[in-house]
Image: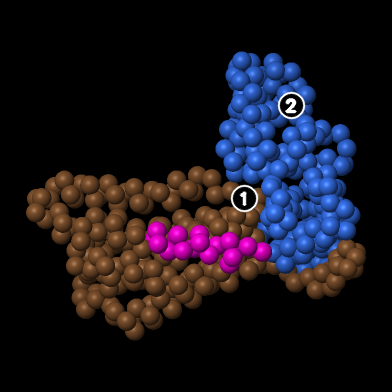
Chain colours: A blue, B brown
């Protein structure tokens, strides 16, 4: 996932300098990731998924000005993807809801398919309080023990447990409402 | 169309994007909007006749400190709202600060004034003109910001519309200060804020339509 971010960001930076080949490579790779991102979340047929992929690519292309070179590229690109997805829900008149089983997917970090999900998790966790983020990162994402996480983050073990509990509750709530800003 | 064809098409023309291009677009909108508002002001109310003397008084600068700090902070908020994946975070509290400071000054003013003078502190002589002028003068800047956002990507269009309304009104209020004869913080926190709020609500109302993409 780190590798994906690094590679895509490098391509984006070159594209912003006017490098058409890099830009093309970026869009191609994004298309692949987006297909899997939307495919996992929507039960649309392939043609509709492709429409959404294309719309997102067009937005990425025409609104490159909105990318801040100092910030993570995938967070930017997948925020656009999410916006386009929510927009599509609205157009179809369906309520925005991500099945709760998806949430457990987000904690898998074992294959390239989950890149998009990990990015999502990053975005979701970004504004949790630091203690909750560190605790979930340690125990749930990296698979460390509570003690190890406590030592690393400088929190007490019981604090880590409480932080995980509260943080997970907040995350599930956000995922369920489909709104990263929900509190 | 096949996705590969689309990508080939999009990659045919890849202009460079200079650093800080997003902020530059917003600043262009502000400069043009402020200039247009100033011309509108000259054509309607004019500037206060004693502007040279007034511009060296404390109330004039308090007013500017208020409107310019609201403008500066809402500019920072708006820029972030236009960049997917970036959050305004603590800046929301920053935006409340100028209002809190003027509100505190107003309380001090009201407490130390004799009760008969309090209504005068609140109403001054231009209470009605002020919010209407600020809201009207904000229109050119708001239009400019809608233009600026054509290359940005607000993931919450309604909020971006509201912030654009607030910023446009803060610019308008800074221009309106050239004619405004009022000196009390109580006047400012009431009537300036009213102008800002009306424009913010207007921005939120049209935000979904004008800022979505």
Give how far across and how far down residue A34 sits, in percent. Answer: 82, 52
Please give the name of the residue rendered at 63% of the width and 62% of the height, measured from the top-left corner.
B212
x, y percent for residue B180: 26, 69
Viewed as shown, does residue A80 lie left or right of B6? left
The picture quadrant where one finds residue A121 is: top right
Host chain of mark 2: A
The residue stretch that appears in magenta: B196-213
The spot of residue A168 in percent (x, y) is 66, 29
Judge whether residue B210 is colored magenta. Answer: yes
Tell me what residue is drawn at x 68 percent, y 38 percent: A176
Asked whether, in this view, residue A15 is left or right of residue A47, the answer is: left
Left or right position of B208 against A19: left
Residue occupying image coordinates x 75% and y 38%:
A99
- Read off the chain for label 1: B
What residue is drawn where x is 65% and y is 24%?
A164
Q: Is residue A155 visible?
A: yes
Q: Which residue is mark 1?
A: B86
From the image, tell me which residue sits under label 2.
A140
| Image quadrant containing the N terminus of chain B | bottom right
- Give above or below for A171 relative to B9: above
Crowd tier of the residue under label 2, counting other residues whose Cα lies within 10 Å: few below 14, some 14–19, many 20 or above: some
Q: Secondary structure at mark 1?
A: loop
Number of other residues with Cα within 10 Å of mark 1, as a class: few under 14, some 14 to 19, many 20 or more: many
The answer to whether B208 appears left or right of B18 in the picture is left
- Magenta run includes residue A91: no
């Amino acid at each position: 996932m780190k590798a994906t971010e690094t590679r895509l960001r490098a391509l984006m930076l070159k594209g912003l300098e006017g490098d058409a080949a890099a830009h093309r490579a970026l869009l191609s790779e994004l298309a692949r990731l987006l297909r899997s991102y939307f495919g996992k979340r929507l039960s649309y047929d392939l043609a509709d998924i492709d429409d959404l992929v294309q719309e997102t690519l067009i937005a990425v292309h025409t609104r490159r000005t909105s990318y801040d070179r100092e910030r993570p590229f995938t967070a930017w690109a997948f925020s656009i993807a999410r916006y386009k997805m929510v927009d599509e829900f609205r157009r179809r008149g369906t309520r925005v809801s991500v099945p709760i089983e998806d949430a457990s997917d987000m904690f898998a970090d074992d294959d390239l398919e989950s890149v998009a999900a990990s990015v999502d998790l990053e975005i979701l966790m970004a504004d949790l309080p630091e203690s909750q983020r560190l605790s979930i990162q340690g125990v749930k994402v990296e698979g460390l023990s509570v003690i190890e996480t406590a030592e690393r983050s400088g929190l007490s073990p019981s604090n880590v447990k409480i932080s995980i509990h509260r943080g997970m509750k907040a995350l599930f709530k956000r995922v369920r409402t489909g709104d990263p800003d929900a509190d | 169309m096949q996705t590969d064809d689309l990508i080939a098409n999009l990659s045919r023309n890849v202009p460079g994007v200079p650093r800080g291009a997003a902020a530059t677009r917003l600043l262009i909108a502000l400069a043009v909007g402020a200039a247009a508002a100033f011309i509108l002001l000259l054509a309607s109310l004019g500037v206060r006749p004693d502007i040279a003397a007034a511009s060296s008084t404390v109330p004039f600068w308090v007013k500017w400190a208020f409107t310019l700090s609201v403008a500066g902070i809402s500019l920072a908020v708006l820029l972030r709202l236009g960049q997917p994946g970036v959050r305004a975070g603590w800046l929301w509290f920053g935006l409340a600060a100028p209002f809190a400071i003027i509100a505190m000054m107003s309380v001090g003013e009201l407490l130390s004034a004799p009760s008969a003078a309090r209504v005068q502190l609140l109403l001054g002589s231009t209470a009605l003109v002020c919010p209407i002028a600020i809201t009207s003068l904000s229109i050119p800047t708001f239009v400019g910001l809608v233009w600026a956002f054509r290359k940005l990507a607000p993931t919450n269009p309604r909020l971006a519309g509201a912030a654009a309304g607030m910023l446009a009104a803060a610019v308008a209020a800074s221009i309106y200060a050239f004619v405004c004869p009022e000196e009390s913080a109580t006047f400012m926190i009431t009537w300036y804020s009213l102008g800002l709020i009306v424009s913010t609500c207007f921005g939120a109302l049209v935000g979904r339509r004008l800022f979505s993409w």
